[in-house]
Every structure is written in C-alpha cells, then in structure tokens.
C-alpha cells in the first residue's frame, strides 16, 4: 500500500515534525510485521454431522426442540445459507471433504457398504492427498474422531491418510451403544487397532475431541470431528443396544418405536457436545485462534427436516444436499453475519490450507472460503456439479439443471424464484438448458478421465 505524507518544507529542510512522523510510520510498520510473524497459527475444528437436514437445528429453522450451542455459535459467527454437500450420501461427500476435489476423481462416487458382497473392499486410496497430509507438512498435529466411512480395510485407516490420532469407527454407522456395524462386526478403533470402549457414541466423540484439544493446546492442530448423529439406528443416550455380535441387521424388538423422540435426543446430545468443545477452546484460551466449522454430509432422511427445500438424502433435489453451515472464530469471523455465496464441501480443504499459510492446492476443485468468512466477500462465479448413480445436477448462479433418478428427465429451475423446484423452465429457456447440459457432459468427462480406480475384491 502506498502512503502519502504531507511534507512541510522550511528553509529547504524537512521539519522535525515530518521526520518524527516518518519514523513513527516506519516503526509502526515494523511492529505490525513483527506481530504478524509471531502470531500463533490458526487451529481448526471441522465438525461434520451425519444425515442432518437443513432445518434440523434451530438456527436454521427447527422449532420442536432447541440447539442452543449451535445457535450461539451462529450468533457469534457466520451462517452460510447456500452451502451444499458434494454428494447426497455419506462416503462421496467425505472423500470430497478430505481431498478438496470432486469425489469422482478419487473413484468414490458410491457409498462404501458394510456387506462384503457389495463393495466393503473399496476405500479412499493412499494415492489421494488429504487436508491432514497437507497440514502436517505445515506443522500441524492432526486428529479425527468419530465416523470415517472411507474404507473398512486396514490400509484405508485414517492413520494412513495423514491423521496422527483416530478414535471412532470405519463403517457407515454403528449401534450407538454396542459399536457393532450392520454386519454385526465390532467397529470401534484407536488408530489401526480395534478397542473395547463403553459408552454412547456421541458422548465418546465429544470426550475424545475435548481430550485432543487439551492434549495439543500448545501446538497448531486440526481436529476433524465426524459425528454419527443423526444417522440410524435411531437411539437416544438411554436407549438399549440394537445389534448383536455376529448377527446381521438390527434386532426388531430393540428398535426404537418413537423415532421422533430419539431423533431429537440425538441432536440435542450432539449440540451439547459441540458446546463442550467450544467451552474447552475457551478454557484453553484458544477460541480466538481456532476456526470451528460445522456442517452436514448430506440432507436429512424423511425422519428429519430439509425445509424449505424439496427432496431428501439420496436425491439431488436441494433437500438432498443443501445443508446447514456455521463458522465461528471470535475476533476473526464477524458475529451475526450470513453469506449466500454458493459453496461445497470440497471448499474446506483450500480454506484450511490458505488460512494455515500454505500454497494453493493445485489439484483442488474447491475454492477457499477464507475471504467469505473473514472479509464477507462473495466467491467468484463458477459452475457447481453433483452426480450420484443416474442422477446429476449442475448449478450456475440461480439456475439449476437437474436429472433426478433416471438420468433422462432433465428439468431446469430458477432457485431464486422457485426454491422448491416446482416450475420446469427448460422450454422457456432453451439456451440456458442447452448450455448447462453440455457443461455437465464436459464435466463428467473431465472428472472421470484419469480417475482413481477402486480395486477388485480379490486385490484385498
């Protein structure tokens, strides 16, 4: 920045006042530079909920219960109202989060299922670069607590993807009480070893997250907290176990009958745990230097609420992938702010790397949200894409072209005028329709060319 100083000339010489002013400016700039150089690194706590709908927390519209801790974070920070998961289901979104790329490039477009007869042998290959690996090179200690769902086999364990510490489970879901996966297999880990640990999953996730922060409070850290809430099986903290070791599926006589009650309890417990994480940051005097991000891996099932959007988990209607997002960092993220800048899960990696002082991740598809969070700027215009099985969608500003389920019935919507995607404008806007359809075709070729290939079952 160039500074202009009003010089006072007297007898061909700068006056003492001018000299003093120049000296003060130089000293001030030196102090600012020294302060910047010695400023502590920003820590990160990335919290992902599971199957949590847009209106499943009260700051985004829930009315039958309250989530006071998330509400307080939103009031003290920023809400993104146009944030989307990369996929409408678990594994693809998590692959995009970790790599900063469209999940198709990593060969992770499908859910990794627990059943060996399906694709239990698939996972995030170690050839992929994760934000944990990038941040480790920048001097960060990294941890992940909770749900992994990027590979059941040991070679896919988080410790092989840049995480120093892992407590949690590798499957899509476990019984909240017994920690058995859908196939009746024990699924609770510390790093690459199965361990026995009693407790309600949500409570354990919170406790291990708190412990990690306390243990690493004197060094830069990045903690990924992947809650099981509010994925099935629907179990509140006082509900019994629903799975038995060696038996496939849930016990019918142990399933919760009042799902609505359990659903609310699950969210309330997660919210309480998030409050404990925030209080731990405050007690460690880390709140001002820690960026906390909260969002979901996809929209809710029909048990939850995606209002005002149409559709549910598994679909590419807005309700399947538009999710709540809260950013909190006192003194950096202005309180009570909102942003309607469209963003995706894959934007998290570039965000963390930029804030941590790293170079732009060349292979990332995502864009850094740092300027959105810290300066209330809007992201540059870009096309956003979704693909799941035979469904696909492409977004350009308020325009969204959607082919849901069958891959053939393609419809064009203007989300600004028609947020519930009811009025097909494909005939009224043929040029936009044609342009976005071609854009999707080009993108599909791009993300699948050279994509990572998942191994055949026999390779594992």
Image (spheres, rainbow, N blue to C red):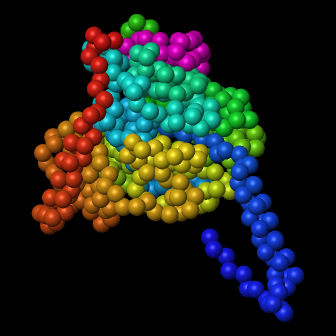
| 346, above or below 241, in the image | below
Residue 28: quarter of image: bottom right
Q: Which residues are magenta?
A: 174-202
Point 81% across, 81% down: residue: 18
Point 71% across, 46% down: residue: 40
Q: Which percent across, then down, holds residue 13? A: 83, 87
Residue 436: quarter of image: bottom left
In the image, is 169 to the left or to the right of 116?
right
Image quarter (top left, top right, bottom left or bottom right) of the C terminus: top left
In the image, is 391 to the left or to the right of 24?
left
Can you see residue 211?
Answer: yes
Point 82% across, 84% down: residue: 14
Q: Which percent across, then down, holds residue 197? A: 59, 15
Q: Which percent across, then down, holds residue 408? A: 12, 45
Question: Can you name the residue that lies furthest to the top here?
Answer: 246
> Looking at the image, how many numbered discs can be counted on the residues?
0
Point 45% across, 56% down: residue: 81
Magenta stretch encompasses residue 178: yes
- Judging depth in this view, the residue of 372 and 237 nearest the camera is 372
Q: Which percent across, then down, holds residue 432? A: 19, 63
- Judging depth in this view, the residue of 397 and 188 nearest the camera is 397
């Amino acid at each position: 920045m160039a500074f202009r100083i009003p010089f006072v000339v007297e007898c061909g010489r700068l006056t003492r006042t001018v000299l003093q002013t120049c000296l003060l400016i130089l000293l001030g700039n030196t102090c600012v530079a020294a302060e910047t150089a010695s400023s502590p690194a920003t820590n990160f706590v990335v919290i992902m909920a599971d199957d949590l709908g847009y209106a499943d927390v009260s700051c985004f519209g829930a009315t039958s219960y309250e989530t006071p801790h998330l509400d307080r974070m939103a009031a003290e920070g920023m809400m993104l109202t146009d944030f989307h998961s990369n996929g409408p289901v678990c594994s693809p979104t998590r692959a995009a989060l970790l790599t900063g790329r469209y999940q198709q490039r990593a060969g992770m477009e499908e859910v990794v299922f627990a059943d060996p007869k399906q694709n239990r042998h698939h996972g995030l290959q170690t050839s992929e670069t994760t934000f944990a690996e990038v941040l480790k090179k920048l001097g960060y200690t990294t941890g992940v607590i909770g749900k992994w769902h990027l590979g059941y086999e040991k070679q896919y364990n988080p410790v092989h993807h840049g995480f120093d510490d892992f407590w949690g489970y590798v499957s899509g879901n476990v019984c909240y009480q017994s920690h058995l996966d859908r196939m009746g297999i024990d699924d609770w880990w510390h790093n690459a070893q199965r361990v026995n640990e009693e407790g309600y999953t949500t409570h354990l996730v919170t406790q291990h997250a708190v412990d990690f922060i306390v243990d690493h409070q004197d060094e830069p850290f990045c903690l990924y907290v992947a809650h099981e809430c509010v994925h099935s099986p629907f179990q509140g903290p006082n509900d019994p176990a629903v799975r038995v070791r060696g038996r496939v599926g849930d016990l019918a006589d142990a399933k919760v009958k009042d799902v609505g009650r359990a659903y609310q309890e699950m969210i309330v417990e997660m919210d309480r745990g998030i409050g404990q994480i925030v209080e731990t940051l405050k007690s460690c005097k880390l709140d001002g230097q820690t960026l906390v991000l909260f969002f979901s891996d996809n929209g809710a099932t029909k048990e939850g609420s995606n209002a005002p959007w149409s559709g549910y988990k598994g679909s590419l209607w807005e309700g399947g992938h538009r999710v709540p997002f809260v950013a909190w960092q006192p003194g950096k993220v202005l309180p009570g702010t909102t942003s309607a800048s469209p963003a995706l899960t894959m934007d998290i990696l570039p965000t963390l790397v930029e804030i941590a002082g790293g170079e732009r991740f060349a292979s990332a598809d995502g864009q850094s949200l740092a300027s959105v969070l810290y300066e209330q700027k809007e992201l540059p215009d870009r096309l956003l894409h979704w693909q799941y099985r035979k469904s696909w969608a492409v977004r350009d500003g308020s325009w969204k072209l959607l082919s849901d389920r069958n891959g053939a019935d393609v419809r064009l919507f203007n989300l600004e005028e028609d947020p519930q995607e009811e009025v097909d404008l494909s005939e009224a806007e043929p040029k936009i329709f044609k342009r976005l359809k071609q854009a999707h075709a080009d993108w599909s070729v791009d993300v699948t060319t050279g994509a990572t290939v998942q191994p055949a079952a026999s390779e594992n």
